[in-house]
Amino acid sequence: LLTVSRTSMDKLDKSQNEMMRFILGCTPETSCEAMHYVLVWPTINITHIVTQVKAYLRVSEDTNHALHNA
């Protein structure tokens, strides 16, 4: 349910890091963890996991969903 390749995740992560640096005006030496903390942004991996869980819960609650008993 909602799979993303490692390559795509890495590209999204890199884009998010560049965006955070642009917004905050940080140098490449600034840690990503610090920027995530300042902006209160979850990482791409966390966002993906939360999205997977939401989709799973939506399917499990809807007995008419095609994937409900899969």
Image (spheres, grey):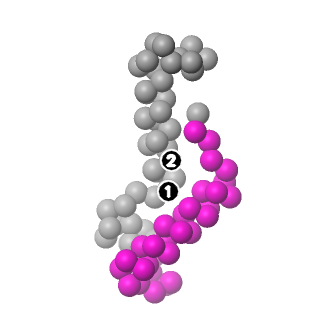
| Quadrant of the frame with the N terminus | top right
Give residue 44's mark. Answer: 1
Apparent side of residue 6 relative to residue 40 in the rendered image (left or right): right
Residue that carries the numbered disc 2 in the rendered image: 48
Which of 38 and 22 lies nearest the eye of the viewer? 22
Give percent across and percent down for residue 2.
Answer: 58, 39
Residue 33 included in the magenta stretch of the image: no
Q: Position of residue 54 (x, y in %)?
A: 43, 35
Magenta region includes residue 9: yes
Which residues fall within the magenta stretch?
Answer: 2-31
Residue shown at 62% from the left, 47% from the top: 4
For the residue carrying disc 1, how many other residues have a C-alpha within 10 Å: few (<14), some (14-19), or many (20+)?
some
Q: Amino acid at mark 1?
A: Ile
Q: Residue at x 56, y 69 (%)?
A: 14
**Figure quadrant of the C terminus:** top right
* Left or right of 70, for residue 63: left
